[in-house]
Image (cartoon, helix red, strand yellow):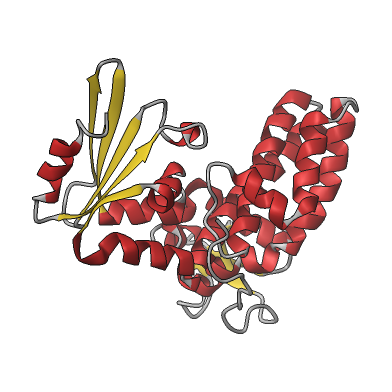
Amino acid sequence: MKELLHPICHEWANRCNTHGILMIEKTACHAATTDTFDVVLLVIVDPQSEPMLLRQYSLNEKKAVLYAVSERQLNEWLVLGSHRKAVDWVFNGKVVFDRNGYVQQLRQRLEQFPPKERRLKMGLEFAKLIRRYTDGKALFAAKHWLDSYNHMVQALHHLARLTVIEHGLYPEVTVWNQVKRMDGRIYKLYEELVGSEEPLPKRLELLLLASEFLIHSYVESGSSHLCEALKEKNGAWSIEEMTGHPQFAPYSVDLVIMLEYLVERKVLTVVEMPTKGNTMFERYYTLQKKNFDGPLPLILKSGRDR
Protein backbone atom coordinates (compact mmCIF):
# COMPACT_ATOMS: atom_id res chain seq x y z
CA MET A 1 0.00 0.00 0.00
CA LYS A 2 2.91 2.35 0.61
CA GLU A 3 3.46 2.64 -3.16
CA LEU A 4 -0.13 3.83 -3.54
CA LEU A 5 0.48 6.53 -0.94
CA HIS A 6 3.32 8.08 -2.93
CA PRO A 7 1.02 10.59 -4.74
CA ILE A 8 -0.26 11.79 -1.37
CA CYS A 9 3.29 12.14 -0.07
CA HIS A 10 4.29 13.96 -3.25
CA GLU A 11 1.39 16.39 -2.85
CA TRP A 12 2.41 17.27 0.71
CA ALA A 13 6.11 17.47 -0.17
CA ASN A 14 5.32 20.12 -2.79
CA ARG A 15 3.72 22.37 -0.19
CA CYS A 16 6.10 25.07 1.00
CA ASN A 17 4.98 24.73 4.62
CA THR A 18 5.88 21.02 4.87
CA HIS A 19 9.06 20.31 6.86
CA GLY A 20 9.10 16.53 6.64
CA ILE A 21 7.14 13.33 6.08
CA LEU A 22 7.57 10.06 8.00
CA MET A 23 6.00 6.70 7.19
CA ILE A 24 5.35 4.07 9.86
CA GLU A 25 4.28 0.62 8.68
CA LYS A 26 2.49 -1.92 10.84
CA THR A 27 4.78 -4.82 11.67
CA ALA A 28 4.95 -7.36 14.47
CA CYS A 29 7.30 -4.99 16.30
CA HIS A 30 5.29 -1.82 15.68
CA ALA A 31 1.67 -3.06 15.70
CA ALA A 32 0.96 -1.14 18.92
CA THR A 33 2.10 2.17 17.44
CA THR A 34 -0.13 2.32 14.33
CA ASP A 35 -3.60 2.09 15.97
CA THR A 36 -4.45 -0.98 13.81
CA PHE A 37 -3.71 0.93 10.58
CA ASP A 38 -1.37 -0.64 8.04
CA VAL A 39 0.44 2.65 7.47
CA VAL A 40 0.70 5.90 9.42
CA LEU A 41 1.90 9.02 7.60
CA LEU A 42 3.21 11.80 9.83
CA VAL A 43 3.47 15.12 7.98
CA ILE A 44 5.19 17.89 9.94
CA VAL A 45 4.24 21.41 8.87
CA ASP A 46 5.31 24.88 10.03
CA PRO A 47 4.19 26.26 13.43
CA GLN A 48 1.71 28.74 11.92
CA SER A 49 -0.38 25.98 10.30
CA GLU A 50 -3.46 24.36 11.83
CA PRO A 51 -2.44 22.21 14.84
CA MET A 52 -3.60 18.95 13.26
CA LEU A 53 -5.33 17.66 10.15
CA LEU A 54 -6.43 14.02 10.13
CA ARG A 55 -7.31 11.93 7.07
CA GLN A 56 -7.93 8.21 6.55
CA TYR A 57 -7.61 6.11 3.38
CA SER A 58 -8.44 2.53 2.41
CA LEU A 59 -7.69 0.30 -0.56
CA ASN A 60 -8.01 -3.47 -1.05
CA GLU A 61 -8.75 -4.08 2.65
CA LYS A 62 -5.69 -2.05 3.65
CA LYS A 63 -6.04 1.19 5.56
CA ALA A 64 -3.84 4.20 6.23
CA VAL A 65 -4.06 7.31 8.36
CA LEU A 66 -2.41 10.68 7.75
CA TYR A 67 -1.55 13.13 10.53
CA ALA A 68 -0.57 16.59 9.28
CA VAL A 69 0.76 18.15 12.48
CA SER A 70 2.18 21.60 13.11
CA GLU A 71 5.68 21.83 14.55
CA ARG A 72 4.21 23.44 17.68
CA GLN A 73 1.66 20.64 18.16
CA LEU A 74 4.30 17.95 17.66
CA ASN A 75 6.58 19.55 20.26
CA GLU A 76 3.65 19.63 22.69
CA TRP A 77 3.05 15.93 22.10
CA LEU A 78 6.70 15.11 22.67
CA VAL A 79 7.33 17.29 25.73
CA LEU A 80 3.98 16.96 27.50
CA GLY A 81 3.52 13.30 26.58
CA SER A 82 -0.02 13.95 25.34
CA HIS A 83 0.48 11.60 22.36
CA ARG A 84 2.92 8.92 23.49
CA LYS A 85 3.12 7.17 20.12
CA ALA A 86 4.58 10.30 18.52
CA VAL A 87 7.98 9.47 20.04
CA ASP A 88 8.04 6.12 18.23
CA TRP A 89 6.88 7.71 15.00
CA VAL A 90 9.65 10.31 14.99
CA PHE A 91 12.44 7.92 15.97
CA ASN A 92 11.40 4.80 14.05
CA GLY A 93 9.49 6.15 11.05
CA LYS A 94 10.94 5.92 7.56
CA VAL A 95 11.85 9.38 6.26
CA VAL A 96 9.95 9.97 3.02
CA PHE A 97 10.67 13.69 2.73
CA ASP A 98 13.07 15.91 4.68
CA ARG A 99 13.26 19.59 3.76
CA ASN A 100 16.67 21.06 4.60
CA GLY A 101 17.42 18.22 7.02
CA TYR A 102 14.55 19.15 9.36
CA VAL A 103 13.74 15.57 10.42
CA GLN A 104 17.39 14.72 10.98
CA GLN A 105 17.81 17.81 13.17
CA LEU A 106 14.62 16.98 15.08
CA ARG A 107 15.90 13.49 15.84
CA GLN A 108 19.26 14.87 16.96
CA ARG A 109 17.53 17.34 19.29
CA LEU A 110 15.40 14.59 20.80
CA GLU A 111 18.44 12.37 21.29
CA GLN A 112 20.18 15.20 23.14
CA PHE A 113 17.00 15.81 25.20
CA PRO A 114 17.69 19.45 26.22
CA PRO A 115 17.85 19.88 30.04
CA LYS A 116 15.01 22.43 30.09
CA GLU A 117 12.61 20.06 28.34
CA ARG A 118 13.86 17.17 30.45
CA ARG A 119 13.14 18.97 33.71
CA LEU A 120 9.63 19.89 32.57
CA LYS A 121 8.89 16.34 31.44
CA MET A 122 10.18 14.92 34.72
CA GLY A 123 8.04 17.40 36.64
CA LEU A 124 4.88 16.42 34.76
CA GLU A 125 5.46 12.70 35.26
CA PHE A 126 6.29 13.27 38.94
CA ALA A 127 3.05 15.23 39.44
CA LYS A 128 1.02 12.44 37.79
CA LEU A 129 2.87 9.89 39.93
CA ILE A 130 1.98 11.78 43.13
CA ARG A 131 -1.66 11.99 42.02
CA ARG A 132 -1.96 8.25 41.35
CA TYR A 133 0.01 7.21 44.44
CA THR A 134 -1.96 9.48 46.79
CA ASP A 135 -5.32 8.34 45.42
CA GLY A 136 -4.23 4.70 45.45
CA LYS A 137 -3.11 4.98 49.07
CA ALA A 138 -6.41 6.60 50.11
CA LEU A 139 -8.44 3.91 48.33
CA PHE A 140 -6.34 1.21 49.99
CA ALA A 141 -7.06 2.73 53.41
CA ALA A 142 -10.78 2.63 52.53
CA LYS A 143 -10.40 -1.06 51.50
CA HIS A 144 -11.38 -0.43 47.89
CA TRP A 145 -8.81 -2.98 46.70
CA LEU A 146 -9.54 -3.04 42.96
CA ASP A 147 -9.72 0.74 42.66
CA SER A 148 -6.49 1.05 44.62
CA TYR A 149 -4.91 -1.57 42.33
CA ASN A 150 -5.86 0.43 39.23
CA HIS A 151 -4.28 3.61 40.60
CA MET A 152 -1.12 1.84 41.72
CA VAL A 153 -0.62 0.23 38.30
CA GLN A 154 -0.82 3.71 36.78
CA ALA A 155 1.54 5.05 39.46
CA LEU A 156 4.11 2.42 38.48
CA HIS A 157 3.77 3.44 34.83
CA HIS A 158 4.54 7.06 35.75
CA LEU A 159 7.45 5.89 37.90
CA ALA A 160 8.74 3.87 34.95
CA ARG A 161 8.52 6.85 32.59
CA LEU A 162 10.23 9.04 35.18
CA THR A 163 13.12 6.56 35.29
CA VAL A 164 13.46 6.54 31.51
CA ILE A 165 13.51 10.35 31.37
CA GLU A 166 16.14 10.49 34.12
CA HIS A 167 18.32 8.25 31.92
CA GLY A 168 18.08 10.85 29.15
CA LEU A 169 15.58 9.04 26.93
CA TYR A 170 12.01 9.63 25.84
CA PRO A 171 9.54 7.02 27.16
CA GLU A 172 8.26 4.81 24.36
CA VAL A 173 5.04 2.82 24.07
CA THR A 174 6.97 -0.26 25.24
CA VAL A 175 8.25 1.54 28.32
CA TRP A 176 8.70 -1.61 30.40
CA ASN A 177 11.29 -2.94 27.95
CA GLN A 178 13.21 0.28 28.56
CA VAL A 179 12.84 0.13 32.35
CA LYS A 180 13.92 -3.51 32.56
CA ARG A 181 17.38 -2.45 31.33
CA MET A 182 17.59 0.58 33.65
CA ASP A 183 16.08 -0.15 37.05
CA GLY A 184 15.35 -3.72 38.06
CA ARG A 185 13.66 -2.59 41.28
CA ILE A 186 10.77 -0.86 39.53
CA TYR A 187 10.38 -3.70 37.03
CA LYS A 188 10.28 -6.19 39.92
CA LEU A 189 7.60 -4.17 41.73
CA TYR A 190 5.44 -4.22 38.61
CA GLU A 191 5.91 -7.97 38.16
CA GLU A 192 5.00 -8.65 41.78
CA LEU A 193 1.91 -6.46 41.68
CA VAL A 194 0.41 -8.00 38.53
CA GLY A 195 1.76 -11.55 38.79
CA SER A 196 2.12 -12.50 42.45
CA GLU A 197 -0.14 -15.14 44.00
CA GLU A 198 -0.33 -13.18 47.26
CA PRO A 199 -3.80 -11.81 48.16
CA LEU A 200 -4.40 -8.44 46.51
CA PRO A 201 -4.48 -6.43 49.79
CA LYS A 202 -1.09 -7.85 50.74
CA ARG A 203 0.39 -7.04 47.32
CA LEU A 204 -0.88 -3.49 47.58
CA GLU A 205 0.43 -3.06 51.11
CA LEU A 206 3.93 -4.15 50.09
CA LEU A 207 3.86 -1.98 46.97
CA LEU A 208 2.77 1.13 48.88
CA LEU A 209 5.68 0.74 51.30
CA ALA A 210 8.24 0.18 48.54
CA SER A 211 6.82 2.95 46.34
CA GLU A 212 7.05 5.54 49.09
CA PHE A 213 10.81 5.06 49.28
CA LEU A 214 11.26 5.23 45.49
CA ILE A 215 9.06 8.32 45.15
CA HIS A 216 11.03 10.07 47.88
CA SER A 217 14.24 9.44 45.91
CA TYR A 218 12.75 11.42 42.98
CA VAL A 219 11.60 14.47 44.97
CA GLU A 220 14.63 16.58 44.05
CA SER A 221 14.72 15.87 40.32
CA GLY A 222 10.93 15.62 39.97
CA SER A 223 10.30 19.04 41.54
CA SER A 224 13.25 20.85 39.92
CA HIS A 225 11.21 22.50 37.15
CA LEU A 226 8.45 23.68 39.47
CA CYS A 227 10.93 25.07 42.00
CA GLU A 228 12.84 26.95 39.30
CA ALA A 229 9.56 28.45 38.08
CA LEU A 230 8.73 29.62 41.61
CA LYS A 231 11.98 31.61 41.63
CA GLU A 232 10.68 33.85 38.84
CA LYS A 233 8.89 35.91 41.47
CA ASN A 234 10.18 37.36 44.73
CA GLY A 235 7.88 36.18 47.47
CA ALA A 236 5.11 33.63 47.70
CA TRP A 237 2.66 32.57 44.98
CA SER A 238 -1.09 32.07 45.26
CA ILE A 239 -2.63 29.12 43.47
CA GLU A 240 -4.51 31.63 41.29
CA GLU A 241 -1.22 33.19 40.16
CA MET A 242 0.26 29.80 39.39
CA THR A 243 -2.66 28.48 37.36
CA GLY A 244 -2.53 31.63 35.24
CA HIS A 245 1.21 31.38 34.58
CA PRO A 246 2.47 29.52 31.46
CA GLN A 247 5.25 27.75 33.39
CA PHE A 248 2.71 25.97 35.61
CA ALA A 249 -0.06 25.47 33.03
CA PRO A 250 1.22 22.04 31.82
CA TYR A 251 0.70 20.58 35.33
CA SER A 252 -3.04 21.20 34.96
CA VAL A 253 -5.15 19.38 37.57
CA ASP A 254 -2.10 17.72 39.15
CA LEU A 255 -0.57 21.02 40.31
CA VAL A 256 -2.48 21.26 43.60
CA ILE A 257 -1.67 17.78 44.85
CA MET A 258 1.98 18.16 43.87
CA LEU A 259 2.22 21.42 45.83
CA GLU A 260 0.72 19.78 48.91
CA TYR A 261 3.08 16.82 48.62
CA LEU A 262 6.08 19.17 48.41
CA VAL A 263 4.82 21.01 51.50
CA GLU A 264 4.71 17.68 53.36
CA ARG A 265 8.26 16.97 52.20
CA LYS A 266 9.38 20.41 53.41
CA VAL A 267 10.42 21.50 49.94
CA LEU A 268 7.79 24.26 49.98
CA THR A 269 6.34 26.39 52.77
CA VAL A 270 2.77 27.64 53.07
CA VAL A 271 2.40 31.34 53.86
CA GLU A 272 -1.01 32.47 55.12
CA MET A 273 -2.11 35.88 53.86
CA PRO A 274 -5.15 37.65 55.39
CA THR A 275 -8.15 38.16 53.13
CA LYS A 276 -10.12 41.42 52.89
CA GLY A 277 -12.50 40.42 55.63
CA ASN A 278 -9.65 39.24 57.87
CA THR A 279 -11.78 36.26 58.89
CA MET A 280 -9.93 33.76 56.71
CA PHE A 281 -6.44 33.32 55.31
CA GLU A 282 -5.41 32.61 51.72
CA ARG A 283 -2.67 30.02 51.22
CA TYR A 284 0.46 31.06 49.32
CA TYR A 285 3.43 28.85 48.45
CA THR A 286 7.13 29.63 48.56
CA LEU A 287 10.38 27.67 48.52
CA GLN A 288 11.99 26.74 51.77
CA LYS A 289 15.26 28.67 51.86
CA LYS A 290 17.42 25.61 52.41
CA ASN A 291 16.19 23.99 49.19
CA PHE A 292 17.27 24.48 45.59
CA ASP A 293 19.76 27.34 45.61
CA GLY A 294 20.32 26.78 41.89
CA PRO A 295 19.17 24.60 39.00
CA LEU A 296 19.48 20.92 39.78
CA PRO A 297 22.01 19.09 37.62
CA LEU A 298 20.60 16.08 35.82
CA ILE A 299 23.22 13.38 35.45
CA LEU A 300 22.02 11.41 32.48
CA LYS A 301 23.24 9.06 29.85
CA SER A 302 24.16 10.63 26.55
CA GLY A 303 22.73 9.42 23.28
CA ARG A 304 19.81 7.10 22.78
CA ASP A 305 19.70 3.45 23.77
CA ARG A 306 17.86 1.97 20.83
Residue under the image location 45 percent in, 53 percent down: 80
Q: How many marks?
A: 0
The N terminus lies in quadrant: top left
Q: Say which of 276 and 84 sits in front.
A: 84
In the rendered image, the residue lying farthest to the front is: 3
Where does the image place residue 103, in percent across and percent down from the top left?
30, 59
Where does the image place residue 166, in percent across and percent down from the top left?
62, 63
In the rendered image, the residue lying farthest to the bottom is: 293
The C terminus lies in quadrant: bottom right
In the rendered image, the residue lying farthest to the top is: 61
Q: Say which of 78 and 172 sits in front.
A: 172
Q: Based on the displayed image, in which of its 4 quarters is residue 283 positioned?
A: bottom right
Q: Is residue 152 above or below residue 79?
A: above
Where does the image place residue 46, in percent across and percent down from the top left?
19, 57
Residue under the image location 91 percent in, 28 percent down: 198
Left or right: residue 255 compared with residue 157:
left
Q: Is residue 246 visible?
A: no
Left or right: residue 292 compared with residue 225:
right
Q: Based on the displayed image, in which of its 4 quarters is residue 62 positioned?
A: top left
Q: Is residue 288 visible?
A: yes
Left or right: residue 230 compared with residue 20:
right
Left or right: residue 100 compared with residue 170:
left
Q: Is residue 96 above or below residue 233?
A: above
Where does the image place residue 196, in percent across and percent down from the top left?
85, 30
Residue under the image location 46 percent in, 49 percent down: 81
